[in-house]
Amino acid sequence: MTQSYHLSISNSGEKTRLLLSFKYDKEQGYYKTNDAENYNLTLTADHDLADFWTLGTTVRLKRNNISGFQKINNEILYMTPLSDPYLENGDLNYFPNPLNTSGYNPLANDVPGQFADDAQSNLLNLNLTSHIKINKWLSMHTNFGYIFSDYKRGYFYGKDSYKGKGVKTNSGKEYNNYDQWTLNHIITYDNSFGDHNLVVDLVGEMQSRRYDKGTLSGDNQPVEYTSYHNLGSNTENIKIGSSFENWALASVLGRLRYNYKNKYYFNIAFRTDGSSRLAKGNQWAVFPSGGVSWSMKDESFMQNVNWINSLKLRVSYGTVGNTAISPYQTLASLSQYAYLFGEDSSNKFYVYSPTSIVNLDLGWEISKTVNAGVDFGLFNNKLNGYVEYYNTKTSDLLMKRTIPSFTGFNDIWQNIGETETSGVEFNLNYNPVRTKDLNVDFSLNASRNWEKITALISGEDLPNNKWFIGEPLGVFYDYEKIGIWQLGEEEAAAKYNAKVGDIKVKDQNGDGSISAADDRIILGQVRPKWIASLGANVQYKNFDFSFNLNSRWGYLVKPAPYDDITMDGQRWLPAVDYWTPDNPTNSYPRADQASGYDTYRTSNGYQKGDHIKIQDITLGYSFENLLSKKVPIRKLRFYVQMRNIGYLYRAAEFDIIPEQPDINYTVPSSYNFGVNVTF
């Protein structure tokens, strides 16, 4: 259940403008212990200090209170529907599955005093602006932004909680806070002379962020009722941790914009950025960009084409940089380890060992994009939209690369290679009916994307990272399941060290054996090839109705409930069609209580992610002109809204959410009733 309340007050004078708004949200999750409260207060003010000078400020205060939940992972699926989660006396049955004594009751955290997870965050967002009109053509704009965030969390798992499993408690606290400031100055020259308009911007910007974090936890707390408020009483696995980050970014930008007769447009810009996250010698880079456009409709030869209201052609080129790494990842890091000497477990000797490799060559990831498009408005602008093509080539791609274990490390951050992404996107807005009582609008947006790796640092494919030249950056690379070994195929199965009822995978090179090096293939890509959305808004007198559909096509998902599953016959019962001699299915292998694992089980869970989803539907009714001396209301609107309702089409065989194939906390459907009041 969700409650949401929003109140705003505005006032304008000759020199001062104010807006104050407050919003409160309360959400009850579908886990018993999960609740959230959000408070938001925003004040916006502008004041004309003089005819040429305006000051402004925006202050946002936000507080979140969250009572969390423990992710139950897959264990809820271990339960059998033949067992009762409660005993006859009403107490909780902690091990409800007699065939799986490790399957602990997921309801254990609902027992009073056995679970707590409370978090609180506070956020201050301050923005100060100054705009000075120096003369007719010259102005200066200054903006200062500051963000401060404070977060703290306390958690407690009792001995009989889902995590404790009847053994011992676990409790801890953590905090983190960060502050970030941004300062930029913009000097603008804007002059129109004759048919010409010229705008020149000079921009300087600096930003910095500091992040501080601390954690404390332990096990086996003797007194449970103190929850996470007495961490010093923990007697085992006491851990103290802390971390600190600080980074800065400096930027300088010069930009020129010119247009002639509001028909021909030209712009060019040069930007240079310096990031403290990168290695010395590679911290600065220059990013040029530019573009031209032509308003064809404003040409004389188009004036008699009445069904075209606007038509613009545009082409642009630009470069951008990315430093998507945490501070200090160019440096080597050390971790502490304890060694025991003698029979006394308290006699520990602490040493430090390197856990990551230094990379003093790590630099900017740079993307160069060419963009071409057409913007149009037709039939009195009843139909408008755009069609756009883009091509992006990214070099020095920043990724974490897996390296051989004999180096003593698992991976290293590197500029690993180059990629190319291209796509076509179009947007259509159609207003077929526009009358006094009825207005109908439709909007359609769709895009088709292609992506591939064009070069790698090694000069060849890197299968361990699932990076292949000529293929998308994100792919599923695995064995190709072609069925289940059936009765009568015993001899053929034995050649592959398999038995009847096991998963059958394709021998890609036909050498009579299955190996990871030779028989895994690219099964599909992680990101969709097609993304589309369709929306509609209908207003009839005082009624309003809207809906939105979302769709994705051309990709695979691997849902968590069916990924690398254990086929022991004691779990997954609602979903799994096991192979048996009397049920020669090709869906799932035979149940094996002894091992529970088929050699090629990872090949079994892939599903098509194609879907058309009903995102939301809203129906409302408005009462207007209620303003009177007794009732100071301008407008009163009641509405009902439904979100995440379901799917018109879903290719996946299972009941999953293709956009979020994870069972830890799926996006629930919601049904909302609301009231908007305007005074």
Image: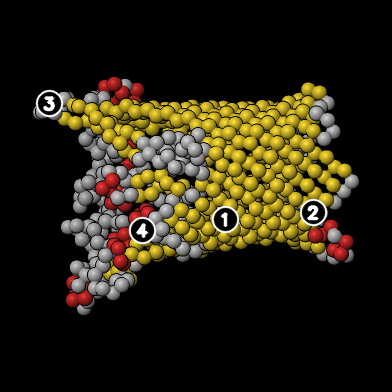
Mark 2 belongs to which amino acid? Tyr
Q: CA distance from mark 2 to mark 3?
A: 83 Å
Q: Dot 3: within a 10 Å radius of its alpha carbon, few (fewer than 14), some, or many (20 or more) residues?
A: few
Q: Nearer the viewer, mark 2 or mark 3?
A: 2
Q: Please say whether residue 25 is visible from this viewpoint.
A: no
Marks 1 and 3 sit apart, C-alpha to C-alpha, by 61 Å
Q: Which residue is mark 1?
A: 392
Residue 344 shows which numbered tag?
3
**Residue 222 image offset from top left, x and y in percent:** 23, 25
Is disc 1 in contact with disc 3, using a CB cutoff of under 8 Å? no
- Considering the numbered disc 4 on the image, is that residue within a helix, a strand or a loop? helix
287 shown above or below 451: above
Residue at (24%, 70%) from the top-left corner?
Answer: 513
Question: Which circle's residue, 2 or 3, is located before the other in the chain?
Answer: 2
Total residue callouts = 4
Marks 4 and 2: CB-CB under 8 Å? Answer: no
What numbered label is drawn on residue 463?
4
- Give me the residue at 10% from left, 28% from top: 343
Horizontal and vertical percent position of residue 533: 60, 57
Q: Nearer the viewer, residue 419 or 12?
A: 419
Residue located beneath label 2 in the image? 264
Q: Residue furthest front?
A: 281
Residues under labels 4 and 2: Cα distance?
Answer: 50 Å
The tag earlier along the polypeptide, 3 or 4, is 3
Nearer to us in this view, 162 or 462: 462
Q: Marks 1 and 2, Cα distance to the nearest angstrom? A: 25 Å
Q: Is residue 16 above or below residue 639?
A: above
Coloration of the structure image = secondary structure
Q: How many neighbours does mark 4 have within 10 angstroms: few (below 14), some (14-19), or many (20 or more)? A: some
Evaluate if marks 3 and 4 touch, with contact meaning CB atoms under 8 Å apart.
no
Q: Amino acid at mark 1?
A: Thr
